[in-house]
Amino acid sequence: MKVKKSFHRLTIFIQPVLTLLLILLISGCLGSPKFSATAIDHNKRGENHLEKGDFDQAVSEYSKAIEADPNYPVPYNNRGVTYSNQGGYKKAIKDYSKAIQLKPDYQKAYYNRGGAYSNKGYYDLAIQDYNKVIELKPDDSAAYNNRGTVYAKKGKYMLAISDFSKAIELDSNAYRAYGNRGQAYFTLDDYMKAIENFNRAIELNPNEMWFYYYRGLSYRGIGKEEKTKKDFEKFNELKQ
């Protein structure tokens, strides 16, 4: 049974950039030559504000850290994280780029810039950054998942599936990658494989509403309307 795809939105592919941004913050001096103690202090204050969602205060503290020591890459990355949380991807990209200029092997800054590029629709640049992340850290499951989401947005579903599969190989609990691989299979009308992946994604994270939505559509694709109805009911329950 062919399922109408006019409703399908690739933006639902789950990319854990924003949800992981706080995890990607780094304190201290990266094990390199000592940076200004004043800059490190302002950076730490900025992290505390960001964790509380006080974005304007976080930006202010990171800016003070940069003023105190313009060669300290961490506050550039962290201020970029704050701008990304506010949707200011252009400013975020500028800060991530500066952090990378100061520290060319700054894996987390490449990761964050890749997410900002993706959100701006600069997919080829995003892929380049995720390539660099994987070069620097070949076992980064999230980087493969994120690069897969970009390939999916470009309509390159087999490349996306390959990346989602690698993410799962590296982390068997990568529920986003299972969900994303399921959505890619759904888009390719391979409903059985889609259902298999959504089943595993739901086992790992039963609170993600989109897993139920797309599994329901996949059930519709094989004519199991009762299961579709049940999944849609769960989707609506979680959506409230």
Image: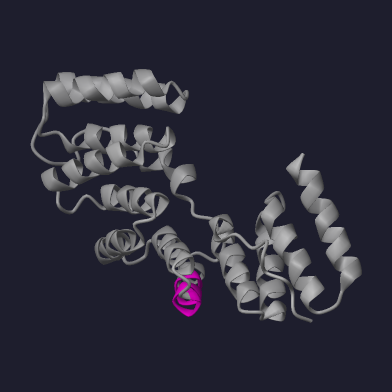
43, above or below 155, in the image:
above
Percent coordinates x, y for residue 59 in the rendering: 31, 24
The residue furthest front is 6
Residue 144 against residue 111 in the figure, above or below: below
209 left or right, relative to 19: right
Task: Please provide the residue range marked out in magenta.
Answer: 157-165
| Residue 40 located within the stretch drawn in magenta | no
- In x, y percent, where is residue 231? 82, 59
Quadrant containing the C terminus is top right
- Which residue is nearer to you in this view: 84 or 28? 84
Measured from the top left, where is residue 38 in percent x and y? 16, 18
Name the residue: 29% across, 19% down.
60
Q: Magenta stretch mostly in which secondary structure?
A: helix
Residue 227 shows in this picture: yes
Whether residue 54 sits left or right of residue 7 in the image: it is: left
- 171 in relation to 18, above or below: below
